Image (tube, rainbow, N blue to C red):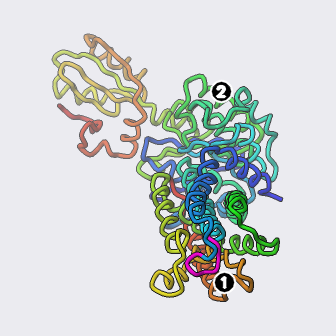
Amino acid sequence: MIGLTYIRFELLRTLRNRRFFALSLGFPLVLYFLIAGASKGVHSIGGTGISAPLYFMAGLASFGTMSAMLSSGGRIATERAAGWNRQLRISPLPPRMYFRAKVITSYMMALLSVGALYAAGAALGVSLSAREWLEMTGLLLVGLIPFAALGIALGHVLTPDSIGPAMGGGVSLLAFLGGTWFPLGNHGFLHDVGQLLPSYWLVQASHVALGGSAWPGKAWLVIAVWTAVLSSLAVRAYRRDTGRV
Amino acid sequence: MRGVDIEIEMGETVALLGPNGAGKSTTIDMMLGLLAPDAGEVSLFGRAPADAVAAGAIGAMLQTGSLIRDLSVRELVTMMASLYPKPLGVEEVLELTGASEFASQRTQKLSGGQTQRVRSAVALVSNPELLVLDEPTVAMDVEGRHAFWRTMREFATRGKTVLFATHYLEEADAYADRAVLMAHGRVVADGPTNEIKAMVGSRTIRATLPGADLGDLAALAALPGVSGADRRGEAVVLTCADSDQTVRALLAEYPHARDIEIIAAGLEEAFLTLTGDAAKPAPGGQASPVQER
């Protein structure tokens, strides 16, 4: 199949970028130990019924995976600046395969980040059944779909020097409004805004520990709408982006 | 871009010749489907550019661009080769473009000249029917330039069509069968390179001619082969299509002419003449037939 070799080298390139690799995996880990380590003994954080290590594990997983997904934007912006995007456009690489390569690379980084945080969580006493681990992971992966699209869209619109602040600021804001740093409670302004954001539902994946379904129907709807909107933006940004940068 | 109408036969090597800002890169972008024309049509092998690109029939070395990092040269060329239906062998192309010696190096460690070689390897490995090169030798030294054109010549002999943009008349003359001259987004001439060379390759004769007056200047302008005469102090400057003929006539008529210099006109000047900009009293522009300064 055309594109397999392309995807393989895309993955290889990402793994070889050591500084990026170390920072994007290490930063959420350090934050996790700082935040969750301090509240290790809290069994029900903010009245959620979820232990602090578990809550923050999902919280930092949301933070780390959002960054991992959006980092494809940084790579795309750099490729564009090098004129490589135009070189690919005049090759028979189908856009679908191009997107697939970018999304797979992002997910690889996100899964590594999740794996590292799970290990850290287990070290701080997080204990879930196999089914709960799997369900949480599944929800995180679904909740990340809109961010895969957002990364591609930003990469095709922004320049390498503007994408850093855009991503740093965007991830911080989404993490804050998603409840990464503290639970947003069950009512109030922050809670209402948070519920409309995919980052909120990433953090809510920790609710698997409470039994029942961690995501209400509303969560699936929010993710679906963001996915639809951001995917169409990504496709549009890609189509328009054929000029010299 | 205005009314650019170029038709290229299969197997031709064509130079797109013009000064900076003439519209060469824009023409190439349109050909490759990277830019849509406001009006008119672009067709490659009877298909839309996007279809020809999807079929892998086009290989190109664009004007601006570097390489993506964190791959070795060999890996990068392999990656690009994998996208095309009938690529050339990776090792063969690395050899052909002189990139074998540094094939195991990471792309971010290469020098400017090496990067250009890898870029040409990326274009060639696609084994295209049409190879498009947009000012490919700009960053190369003289030796690199010769090696590059040898490689492209070799590729063209396989029956491939090659289109390259350049602002060097010598490159067009040495490597193309045909040259298309562009200026200000228009085609100003199109023909075999020797004809184009004769057209733009006008020479300037400069001679010291003490005491030459306006009457002499008119007489000089009427000498065989002269297309323009101009006076600068004691010296006269004649623009001519056939300098050999002119210099003989000049010496017959004005035996006291001295310090005679014959200079090949620059491409930029030739373009100004061809596009008719010279007729306007633009600063630094070449003169209408008789002009005094």
Vertical order, A150 against A223 (above or below): above
Q: Chain of mark 1?
A: A
Q: Nearer the viewer, residue B51 or A175?
A: A175
Q: Position of residue B7 (x, y in %)?
A: 61, 53
Q: Which quadrant would residue B114 be assigned to in this image?
A: top right
Q: Quadrant of residue B174?
A: top right
> Mark 1 highlights which residue?
A220
Helix, strand or loop at label 2? It is helix
Query: Dot 2, how many residues are within 10 Å of its Cα: few (below 14), some (14-19), or many (20+)?
Result: some
Percent across and percent down for residue B124 are: 71, 41
Residue A112 lies left or right of residue B283; in this view the side is: right
> Is residue A51 magenta-colored?
yes
Examine the image and state in which quarter residue B42 appears.
Answer: bottom right
| Chain letter of the residue beneath label 2 in the structure image | B
State how far apart marks 1 and 2 are (Cα).
60 Å
Q: Residue at x 56, y 72 (%)?
A: A233
Relative image position of residue A62 (x, y in whole percent): 61, 67
Residue carrying label 2: B147
Q: Amino acid at mark 1?
A: Trp
Q: Amino acid at mark 2?
A: Ala
Taking the image as drawn, is residue B52 in sight? no
Dot 1: element: helix
In the image, B13: left or right of B29? right
In which quadrant of the rendered image does the N terminus of chain B lie?
A: bottom left
Total number of numbered labels? 2
Range shown magenta: A45-52
Answer yes or no: are tags 1 and 2 on the same subunit: no
In the image, is residue B38 above or below residue B153? below
Residue B213 or residue B37, whichever sits in front: B37
